[in-house]
Amino acid sequence: MQFNRCGKSGLMLPAISLGLWHNFGHVDKPETNRSIMHAAFDAGITHFDLANNYGPPPGSAEENFGRILKQDFQSYRDEMIISTKAGYLMWPGPYGDFGSRKYLLGSLDQSLKRMGLDYVDIFYHHRPDPDTPLEETMMALVQAVRTGKSLYAGISNYTASQTKAAAKILNEFGTPCLIHQPKYSMLVREPEEALLDTLENKGIGCIAFSPLAQGLLTSKYQHSIPKDSRAAKSHGFLQKQAITPDLLKKIGSLHSLATGRNQSLAQMALAWVLKDPRVTSVLVGVSSVKQLSDNLLALQNTEFDTDELNKINEILNRS
Ligand code: NDP
């Protein structure tokens, strides 16, 4: 595994990290969860990313992860980086959503209980809250760190200007923002507009989520929607309507380009995100060990020449 420094912090993260948004809920197979975690850790993936609401049902990914940790990974806790988040709807009423101090600190306690942990390594605010003062939300992250329930603070889905404001508050209180988690892939390039520069300037790491655009940047949807795919599952977040003929044409062209680089499309898509030194890690989800093994090979070639980059841009910009 290649390890990259997370911004200007002391923490190194693996270039590929594993996310448990899908595939680790009570609706999924426990033996598959367990084998994915083993294969990941054995390959040097030391970082596992969760959130309070991952499942379904919400909370079940943390429960399943906690069970596997207890069974198999207890003696490896100091070799692992475990993150969780709060920010989306988790429980009924006004205290289980968005960014109040009440929600964040209550949710962190619940997450620790579900995972059977004394602390997480990174606690994130999952999304900006338009109504709660930013100071309140950031001070909840500071308190999570000061009380030892989290070692570092992170933010996700914040814009560049929101990130600057959040980082300023966190710095003032001696808990620098470790990391930002934005959606970033060949199909979603907003972070290139201002966010990546902001992160570099502020010394904040970047972990890109959905680098395969939930599986669109693979060859799996080329001919049909496979029965066991995310787009086919009623609880999957990938909508069938997202798979349009125009998109499939682009995916086909990207696939040919990847073949020319001796990579699968998934490998090329991950390599493409990792080519930017401002990106610390890509956060993949997998539904099998086979997918994980395929994705790990991306690290064998993360270099692109100008001609390849131009061709990729040309394909993505086709109307
Ligand atoms: P990806 O873009 O990596 O999509 C993962 C899906 O792609 C898999 O479930 C699988 O789909 C398919 N896939 C992966 N590898 C392959 C392969 N080699 N060949 C074919 N298909 C493949 O990431 P996710 O969307 O799952 O997000 C990753 C993580 O990012 C999450 O688990 C979570 O930790 C984080 N995240 C954070 C968010 C935030 O707001 N902060 C929001 C969303 C995600 P299939 O199931 O069809 O086999």
Image (cartoon, rainbow, N blue to C red):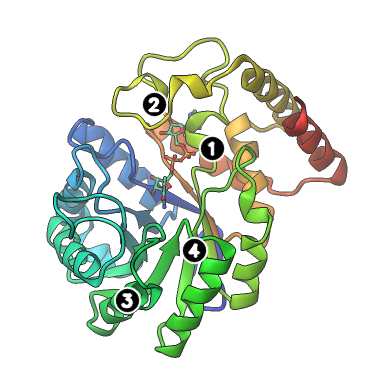
Helix, strand or loop status at disc 2: helix
Q: Quadrant of residue 45?
A: bottom left
How much space separates mark 4 and mark 2, taking CA atoms? 25 Å
Amino acid identity at mark 3: Glu
Sooner in the amino-acid sequence: mark 1 or mark 4: 4
Helix, strand or loop status at disc 1: loop
User: Looking at the picture, does residue 84 appear above or below residue 11?
Assistant: above
Q: Which residue is mark 3?
A: 136
Furthest residue in direction top, as rendered: 223
Q: Which of label 2 and label 3 is nearer to you?
A: 3
**Residue 164, percent from left and from top:** 55, 73
Amino acid identity at mark 1: Leu
How much space separates mark 1 and mark 2, taking CA atoms? 12 Å
Amino acid identity at mark 4: His
How much space separates mark 3 and mark 4, taking CA atoms? 18 Å
How much space separates mark 2 and mark 3, taking CA atoms? 36 Å
Q: Which residue is mark 4?
A: 180
- Horizontal side of 249 relative to 157 (left or right) equals right
Q: Mark 3 packing: few (<14 Cα in 10 Å), some, or many (20+)? A: some
Residue located 52% across and 48% down the image = 183
Sooner in the amino-acid sequence: mark 3 or mark 1: 3
Sooner in the amino-acid sequence: mark 1 or mark 2: 1
- Horizontal side of 8 relative to 64 (left or right) equals right
**Residue 165, percent from left and from top:** 51, 75
**Residue 191, percent from left and from top:** 62, 54
Instruction: Name the residue nearer the viewer: 60 or 117.
Output: 60
Helix, strand or loop status at disc 4: strand
